Image (spheres, rainbow, N blue to C red):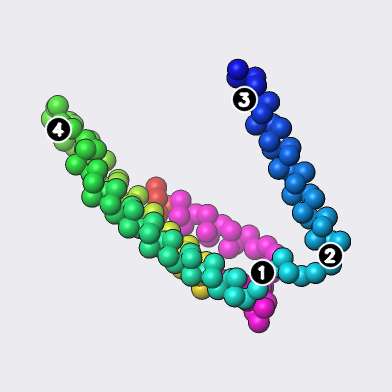
Amino acid sequence: MKLLIILTIFLFVIAAYQLIRVVELLRELKQTQDWKPTDKDNDTVGKLMLAFVILFFGAFYWQIHRWMDKTLPASASEHGVHIDNLMFWNLVLVTTIFLLVNAVLFFFAFKYRGSTSRKAFFYAHNNKLELLWTTVPAITLA
């Protein structure tokens, strides 16, 4: 039975790949640009990103509100209180960073959505910049 399931999934992936290739070939044959995203499409996706992040944060808040009291039972030892306190502050730190990073991520996805009037700037490589955006988050989280 497991072999049959694996074979079915494998064949489904191959069929999906072939279907995508057929669609791409048809687009080339038609030689139209109707499949390219327009400014209206990009604007809609940007607004949907904002709506999604609002729903995402709402669901996150609901999860915290609903299940926070069930995270840890009462401490069974004197050391358990300190460990629970450490876990609580760790959770506060990670949650704060999580919310901040996701808010910035979705805001920038909205702010810099595609537009035909704006050209993207390609910045090839900068070792100092890469070192900075690697070490600052690592030090902050450590």
Q: Amino acid at mark 2?
A: Lys
Residue identifier under label 4:
74
Q: CA distance from mark 3 to mark 2?
A: 37 Å
Residue identifier under label 1:
37
Q: Earlier in the sequence, mark 1 or mark 4?
A: 1
Q: CA distance from mark 3 to mark 4?
A: 45 Å
Q: Earlier in the sequence, mark 2 or mark 1?
A: 2
Q: Amino acid at mark 3?
A: Ile
Q: Earlier in the sequence, mark 3 or mark 2?
A: 3
Look at the picture and state if 128 lies above or below 17: below
Residue at left offset 65%, top offset 73%? 38
**Which picture quadrant has residue 96?**
bottom left
Q: Position of residue 28 (x, y in %)?
A: 84, 61
Residue 119 appears left or right of 110? right
Q: Nearer the viewer, residue 93 or 2?
A: 2
Q: CA distance from mark 1 to mark 4?
A: 55 Å
How crowded is the residue under tag 2: few (<14 C-alpha within 10 Å), some, or many (20+)? few
How crowded is the residue under tag 1: few (<14 C-alpha within 10 Å), some, or many (20+)? few
Magenta residue span: 112-138
**Which picture quadrant has residue 70?**
top left
Residue identifier under label 3:
5
